[in-house]
Image: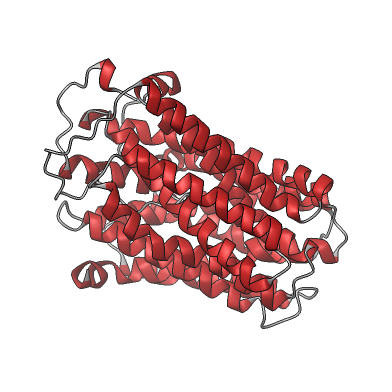
Amino acid sequence: MWQVFKSAWALLLGMLLLMIGNGLQGSLMGIRGAIEDFSTSELSIITSAYFVGFLFGSRMAPEMIRRVGHIRVFAALGSFISAVLILYPTITEPWAWILLRVVFGFSFSGVYVTAESWLNNASTNQTRGKALSLYMIVQMTGIVISQALLNVADPAGFVLFVIPSVLVSLSFAPILLSVTPTPAFETTKAMSLRQLYEVSPTGIVGMFIMGMVFAAQFGMASVYGTEAGLSVAQISIFISAIFLGGMVLQYPFGWFSDRMDRRVLILAAAVLGGVASAIGAFFGGMFEALLVAGFLIGGMSNPLYALLIAYTNDYLGTDDMAAASGGLIFVNGMGAIMGPILTGWAMSYAGPSGFWMYLLATFVVLSIYVMYRMTQRPSAYHEEEDYDAVSYAPVLPTATPVVLEAAQEFYAENVDTDEEIPKSGRD
């Protein structure tokens, strides 16, 4: 791990600052939107707009990089991010925020693709797994730190918008000045969504649902906290608990993932996520119970994302893993676009508890579907196989195709999946 840190510290520092900036503005949107009297429905659309931009940016950024290069794309999109952050408190209209959030999501995804391609290029076959783990820790740490910054100034003012703008601008310095050479960008062969669904229905459906879950957590948690009457300090602690749970429980799930039937683990995580949602819905008036629910929700949803990728890979040949990453990202992104809108609709009808009822419904649907699939086809897991090799990579729902392809490469290097899997053994 130390070797990886020494070789990529500039990238990791830059990504830490980027995540602090993105995490701060994500939570600030819900709080400031409530101050400006935006409705829950308006805030849900504003939240979804980020994921619309992010999805298109993830697909278009590689082509932009191939045409003009990493540095120009990085500088241009970084300028857009800083400008958007300053414009938020200047134009406090829902329609303007929707447009700004699309630009913001597009720009951030492009910045991620650029930085992550450098990180992947800096990794070797021997260090890729550690690099992914360290990158995940840096991302989570940045989001947790960002929540503390919510308390340094009044959300009704300009300061909290200036801080992430400055942090994003500063993040470019270590990345652009310390990382050489810039990596090449290769195009992987495509795999259609239909082909991917035929390989693993559970993987596709699960990734769609987890997009819905993560977008609600990332974008609507602050809206929920405001409607539930929490203070800014309590909202920041609550959101920190969500991401802290994802960071702490990622590795235990990874350890079990390589030593048992992944579908059992996916089902267990989905059921526990439903239980956590029920705790939030029925005991949300107690702040301590709210923190427990948030910790468990984050602790189930983030590992579930990586579990579903690893599970899908179990049914792919090594040549198809990188190609599958684009389809998985797209499906997850479509779920992320729908998630905040459905959450806002639930909160409009049921009040703040609608946030938890929505999460409960998604986890129940996932649980039922996984149980159904378990009755249709046998598992690919065999107890007699050697599972000492690590085939689970800690990947977050914020990952771009670059990181997901790196995770696929890591998986392919550690597990022999070249053998053709008969259709009767596929999920």
Quadrant in which residue 2 is drawn: bottom left
Q: Which of 67 and 147 is in front in this view?
A: 147
The single residue placed furthest to the top in the displayed view is 423
Residue that appears at 23% across and 46% down: 391
Residue that appears at 40% across and 66% down: 248
Counting from the top left corner in percent of width and height, residue 57 is at 53, 43
Whether residue 172 is visible, yes or no, is no
Whether residue 59 is visible, yes or no, is yes
Residue that appears at 32% across and 64% down: 134
Q: Nearer the viewer, residue 101 or 286?
A: 286
Counting from the top left corner in percent of width and height, residue 229 is at 79, 69
Counting from the top left corner in percent of width and height, residue 365 is at 57, 35
Q: Quadrant of the C terminus?
A: top left
142 relative to 288 in the view: left or right = left
**Colour theme:** secondary structure
214 relative to 377 in the view: left or right = right
Q: In which quarter of the image is the N terminus?
A: bottom left
Q: Where 407 falls versus 324 (above or below)?
A: below
11 relative to 330 in the view: left or right = left
Q: Where 134 falls versus 217 (above or below)?
A: below
The single residue placed furthest to the bottom in the displayed view is 152
Q: Where 222 falls versus 209 (above or below)?
A: below
Counting from the top left corner in percent of width and height, residue 398 is at 48, 51
Total labels drawn: 0
Quadrant in which residue 48 is drawn: top right
Q: Nearer the viewer, residue 49 or 284?
A: 284
